[in-house]
Amino acid sequence: MTITRELKIKNTLSGEKEIFKPITEGKIGMYVCGPTVYSYVHMGNVRTFTSFDVIYRYLCYLGYKVRYVRNITDVGHLVGDVDEGEDKIAQKARLEQLEPMEVVQKYTNDFHDVMLTMNNIPPSIEPTATGHILEQIEWVQQIIKEGLAYEVNGSVYFDVLKYNSEHPYGELSGRKIEDLLSNTRELDGQSDKRNPLDFAIWKKAEPQHIMRWNSPWGEGFPGWHLECSVMSTKYLGETFDIHGGGMDLKFPHHECEIAQAVACCGTKPVNYWMHTNMLTMNGVKMSKSAGNSFLPNELFAGDHELLEQPYSPMTVRFFFLMSHYSSQVDFSNEALQAAEKGLKKMTTAYELLQNMNAESFTGSGDSETAKRIQNSCEMCHVKMCDDFNTPEMVAAMFDLCSVINSIENKQIKITDLDAGTFELLNNTFSGFLLDVMGIKIESDANDEGNEEAVNILMEVRGLLRAEKNYALSDLIRDKMAEAGIEVKDGKG
RNA sequence: GGUCGGAUGGUAGAGAGGCUAUACACAGGUCUGCAAAACCUGCUACACCGGUUCGAACCCGGUUCCGACCUCCA
């Protein structure tokens, strides 16, 4: 399969929308920074992973063979200051009186459940930091060998100043080393670092620290930034196509990744950096530390004081799609309710589409209607190829909804378009809704016997209406409404 | 304080020099036994002050407000 469409991606490294060129034609290596599994993922996390899921889906839809790697951080991520903080997993293990690996398993399971509920496709590879300790040690050795890291008291630090004398540090986040230096807080004298900007690539384990591995520098554990460099290189190569993550990881995490990779491999690791924007709550970034985060299950159950009702996973997914991944999104009941209705419009149109068939269309492919359909179908692609502009793509999809409804209502006649254009409509609408947007259709009548019974009732009611026995037909409608099944009569 | 981003109709949210975004809400209409749905129409908005231009929401300068990062965060 050859990919004919030109895709543009906003590269955070250059700040420009660039034409995407994969390293190997037809193939893409994509790495996304995954969660640190020390507690339940919140909706802000989910938004980022859902954004990249749609990006992954569309790349596949275009025909690329994508290797999608998303890690699980299960060691090395410290609480608070990088030098003094406790490991997040270890802290949680202490607090919950669990083995660290029990903590990891518990929250990894939760993460997987949520991803599945949101209909996110699992990555091709989901490596863990603890599964790559040896490789990380090798990297530390190599960086020391290159003269860009130094060991102090069993810990190894990356020498940012020295690195900066040879390569620019701060390119991705647009920072200058002098500004960074003048902004750093004073060292409290406890640190082993030569310079406050240096970061740990290997940390000595204090006696009470439970997660520890042998290394040439004594027992310890890897620094947080290192794992992503090591695992992305291992599975995608020294330079790969796309690296994604939340904007909040740009500095210092991704900046450190670049520095480590250049130090160790001598090449820039990534061609296209992509960053998703934050989910906010009353305009303020949702985060665990700010205490303003929603858990997915609270949202799905409506179990939160700020929620007026429950919102289904697909409603939330659609809500995310209605804004661009690079924009901030604010959570509100009104916006979620609008998304719920919009999604219903989409899925209803999809169901109507299932009952139509191409052969019945006998018109021309040059008609006004046919052209409108062709244009909107094309727009779906054009907009997605323009840096994954999901809101514009959704707008084109809504136009196709109107078309489908008009066909159903006979306002568009079967002589108004040809079978080929209908096929295009069918393939595009279904493909974008299911495969690209990743909307899962939840059927109302979930068991077949039930559906059969509903059909019989509808038939009887139709006969009653034909006899103008509206008292009985309305009674059936009311009773069915009580049972949660909406009846909508067409005309005639 | 430094760096970056943003202020769009009742709400959410795209766009980015001349061309309807879209959805939700609201109003009117068509259809309909009624209701609902659907379809059509309307709601003609771009923080403020200057400037560039035949023309600015969009470019430039300034002002105000907001956010992110600079410390763990998707």
Image (cartoon, coloured by chain):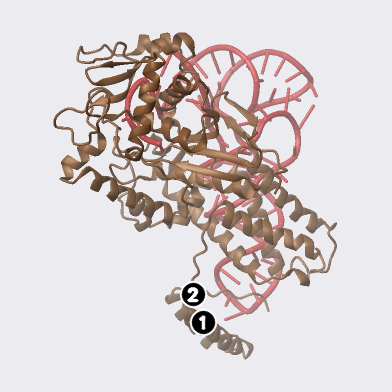
Chain colours: A brown, B red
Residue A434: image quadrant is bottom right
Disc 1 secondary structure class: helix
Query: In terms of depth relative to the viewer, which is nearer, A396 or A252?
Result: A252
Image side of residue A387 versus residue A304, left or right: right
Chain on which label 1 sits: A
Image side of residue A32 versus residue A309, left or right: right
* Residue pictured at 29% horizontal, 35% vertical: A289
For label 1, the crowd category at 10 Å Cα-Cα, with few meaning under 14, some 14 to 19 and many 20 or more, is: some
- Mark in front: 1 vs 2: 2
Mark 1 and mark 2, same subunit? yes
Q: Are marks 1 and 2 in contact (CB under 8 Å)?
A: yes
Amino acid carrying label 1: it is Val
Residue A308: image quadrant is bottom left
Disc 2 secondary structure class: loop
* Percent coordinates x, y for residue A99 in the rendering: 19, 45
* Percent coordinates x, y for residue A165 in the rendering: 45, 8
Query: In terms of depth relative to the viewer, which is nearer, A150 or A472?
Result: A150
* Residue pictured at 77% horizontal, 72% vertical: A360
For label 2, the crowd category at 10 Å Cα-Cα, with few meaning under 14, some 14 to 19 and many 20 or more, is: few
Residue A69, labelled with which disc? Answer: none
Query: In terms of depth relative to the viewer, which is nearer, A386 or A77?
Result: A77
Q: Is residue A482 above or below residue A161?
A: below
Residue A454, labelled with which disc? Answer: 1
Amino acid carrying label 2: it is Ala
- Residue A380 visible in image: yes
* Residue pictured at 25% horizontal, 33% vertical: A213
Q: How many marks?
A: 2
Q: How far apart, in angstroms, are the residues tagged by discs 1 and 2? A: 8 Å
Q: Is residue A384 above or below residue A163?
A: below
- Residue A277 visible in image: no
Residue placed under numbered mark 2 in the picture? A445
